[in-house]
Image: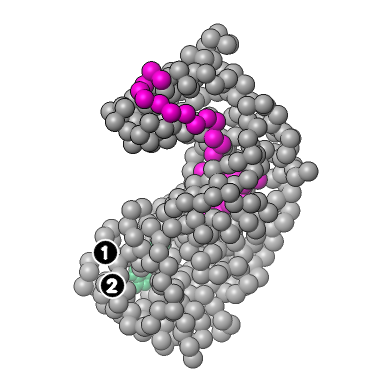
Amino acid sequence: MMIGEGSLKMNILKNRSLTLTCGRGITPYLRREIEQLGYTILSEHDRGVEVEASWDDAPRLNLCLRTALHVMYLLKKFSCRGPDELYREVAAISWEDIIDPSEYVSVVSVVDTTRVNSSMFANQKVKDAVVDRLVEKYGKRPSSGPKRDNVVVNLFWNNDNCWLYLDSSGNKLSDRGYRIMPHAAPLRETLAASLLLAAGYDGSSPLVNPMCGSGTLAIEAALIALNRAPGLLRNNFGFMHIKNFDGARWRLLRKEIKSRARSKLPARIIASDIDKRAADAAKKNARAAGVDGLIDFYVCDFTDTPVPREKSIIILNPAYGFRLGKEIELGRLYKSIGDFFKKKCSGHTGYIFTGNLDLAKQVGLRTSRRLVFFNADIECRLLEYHLYK
Ligand SMILES: C[S@@+](CC[C@H](N)C(=O)[O-])C[C@H]1O[C@@H](n2cnc3c(N)ncnc32)[C@H](O)[C@@H]1O
């Protein structure tokens, strides 16, 4: 029996399927992570997967996964033609078995139907149904509001179909808790981890990250190289606020997962930025992630970043014009990245993550792979360059 199994014996949470969400384009990396943890994928789509797993597996998945955003449990699927029907269907769930009235409840709705005018209205209906049921059973009213760090209920309403989930993560899993100092245009942590996994990074070869900004790629790389589960940085998840949460088992699970981490990096991680404020932010964030002594930080132009002799991964996320910088200047910058790759990085594999393919052409080198990702809503590419000697 896996640690964590059997801890939540509520009859209502008995299904053997969890829905895991991720950013667009990230499903292949999430699938790989889940399979490596020994779980079976039941189905997959653009923004997530269904996994053969029970509610009791949620703590392990929340702790270990680097690329997932939420681990959710489907409470109920029902057809629904209006707000009153929504209220009735939600109020029919035995919330008293799931939520203690001392908890704080938050509802998040994604609505694509003509049956209601706004997701706010659907939120209110679901919240009323949950709260009224708890008041009826306990005579006590839980508090509720927008904060997602306690019990989170998710409604997806599409045409006349509703899916109601319990979110075992609460806040997004990309909120690792280490970004105490953001800098310009930081990558979401789960996207940074996905880019590294897509590049085949496993910590065994050095990683160089010029233009590191607030350090997300370097920090995620360190967590991967140390085999440190990103969830260990957090001490709050949605599942902790569900009835019968077993604190002792949770502590044991954390201990078991922590014991698998290395204390030293197998190969160097080098990060640099021309802006001292960025490098300082990256260092502070790295300290918050517990990896600051392990990453070599430099304040320098990217062309002066030290590149090790051993075969390394060189990964850059330059500005790409929509959020930062100007196109002409950026064109020169991309061209000089191409020169840097040619002159200083031969024998290594280079990666550029960008949302501007016109700028990417200025690099002037042939790509060996072009992988599609999305940064917020911007379609981006992770461009791979084999930099032969
Ligand atoms: C888009 S941000 C990188 C964001 C980063 N991936 C993160 O998650 O925080 C681009 C960074 O490139 C840096 N930069 C711009 N021109 C540079 C240059 N010539 N040499 C080194 N860094 C440069 C900027 O200071 C900025 O921090």
Q: Is residue 107 left or right of residue 102?
A: left
Q: In this view, does 183 lie above or below 306?
A: above
Which residue is at 49% across, 91% downward? 389
Residue 176 in sight in this render: no
Q: Is residue 166 left or right of residue 373?
A: right
Which residue is at 30% across, 70% downward? 357
Could you tell which of marks 2 and 1 lies nearer the N-terminus?
1
Residue 31 among those drawn in magenta:
no
- Whole-percent x, y for residue 70 in the image: 51, 43
201 or 74: which is nearer to us? 74
Q: Tell me whether the residue at label 2 lies in contact with that at label 1, contact meaning CB atoms closer than 8 angstroms.
A: yes
Of the 4 image quadrants, the one containing the N terminus is: top right
- The residue at the far right in this view is 1
Which residue is at 54% across, 21% downward? 93
Residue 64 among those drawn in magenta:
yes
Magenta range? 58-85
